Amino acid sequence: MNTVLGLLIIAVGSFGQSSSYVPIKKVRDWAWECFWLTQGIFAWLVFPYFGALMAVPAGASLGGILAATGAGGTMVAWKVMGYGALWGIGGLTFGLSMRYLGVAMGQSLALGTCSAFGTLIPALLKGDNLFRGDGLILLIGVSIAIAGIAVIGFAGTLRDKNMTEEEKRKAVKDFALKKGILIALLAGVMSACFSLGLEAGDPIKTKALGMGAKDLLALNPVVLLVTIGGFCTNAVFCIYNNIKNKTGKQYLSVPGNILINNLLFCALAGVLWYSQFFGLGMGKSFLQDSPVMLAFSWSILMSLNVLFSNIWGVLLKEWKGSGQRTVTVLITGLSILVISIIFPQLMK
């Protein structure tokens, strides 16, 4: 029962993340770098900070929790933020993959790559044997997830062949298949650093628990450090483009009603994006009795993100005009993803 509850919590957070790119479509009269930086302030600073504060037990401080040190005396926080900075490159290119491929296909390719690297690399670093026992179950589960995502990617290529240029541009304004695929793959590899950052921050989580933090919320301070690192990377890129493209004035040059509209929708996008990791931390606390499900939780989150993002892609008519065969292939890929999520539980 605990496992099912944990999966449901992760699924709710995943649905929030997959929905986070919908409010951005309501942002008006801002260049890409303007709305990306603004939503990033909410997604990677404001809401993670409040989430981390929720984990601080009475009589303790957030600074005291984050000051955990590693075996060699090195501040764990710097290592976690370093992974966050690398993840920030993935987050940056992740946004570009949405721009060139759309919500459905962009998230599918990026998150599929992220799922594999973010699940298997931590297991290998721990010394797990991926060819026997629980390690083999983990490897097979990830392989099934990648297979599902590959099928979804194939559906994307079919869509590209079946749709006219006019239909592609109508569905995704800046559609560019080759460029989008390369960017999405880069995004996936670098985004896996978020998972590595969470693993590196385990001493901080342990310290929070030792100080009396609730297990449901103990991961939140680690998430904050990762997102701070990611924000720094994205902020540098966005400000550079503000200067290069002379778009910095757009933040405040729009009429007051549009400014309020943009801030509200960026804030909504931010809290929806953050909900995936808030939910991941809470969900993992219910998976402690199942080491395989716990190790597989990252892949579960990414697979659910792909599943929900493609549902949004259908609702947003990104697949309209792609043909019946393409839709059948898409549904097949989504079904394989669902199987990958329940596979480790079935093998218990």
Image: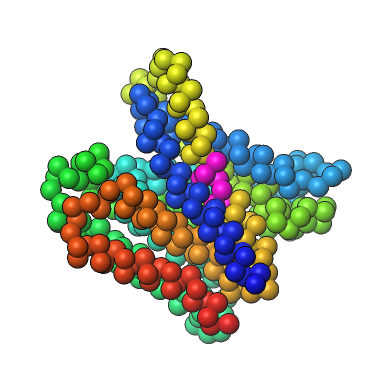
Compared with 346, 48 (above or below) is: above
Residue 255 at x, y percent in the picture: 42, 15
In the figure, is residue 290 to the left or right of 230? right
Residue 112: quarter of image: bottom left
Q: Residue at x 81, y 57 (%)?
A: 210
- Could you say which is closer to the camera, residue 277 or residue 68? 277
Compared with 343, 11 (above or below) is: above
Q: Residue at x 38, y 71 (%)?
A: 336
Kindly give the residue lying farthest to the bottom in the view shown.
132
Residue 345 at x, y percent in the picture: 55, 77
- Could you say which is closer to the camera, residue 82 or residue 102? 102
Q: Taking the image as drawn, is residue 128 in sight?
A: yes
Q: Taking the image as drawn, is residue 185 in sight?
A: no
- Could you say which is closer to the camera, residue 228 or residue 325? 325
> In the image, which residues are magenta?
271-277
Q: Residue at x 57, y 62 (%)?
A: 8
Q: Which part of the image, by quadrant, shows the C terminus? A: bottom right
In the figure, is residue 124 to the left or right of 63? left
Residue 228 at x, y percent in the picture: 58, 40
Question: Main SS type for the magenta part?
Answer: helix
Please check the rendered image and state whether residue 245 is part of the magenta-colored stretch, yes or no.
no
Please check the rendered image and state whether residue 275 is part of the magenta-colored stretch, yes or no.
yes
Compared with 315, 329 (above or below) is: below
Q: Residue at x 75, y 42 (%)?
A: 62
Residue 291 at x, y percent in the picture: 63, 73
Q: Which part of the image, by quadrant, shows the N terminus? A: bottom right
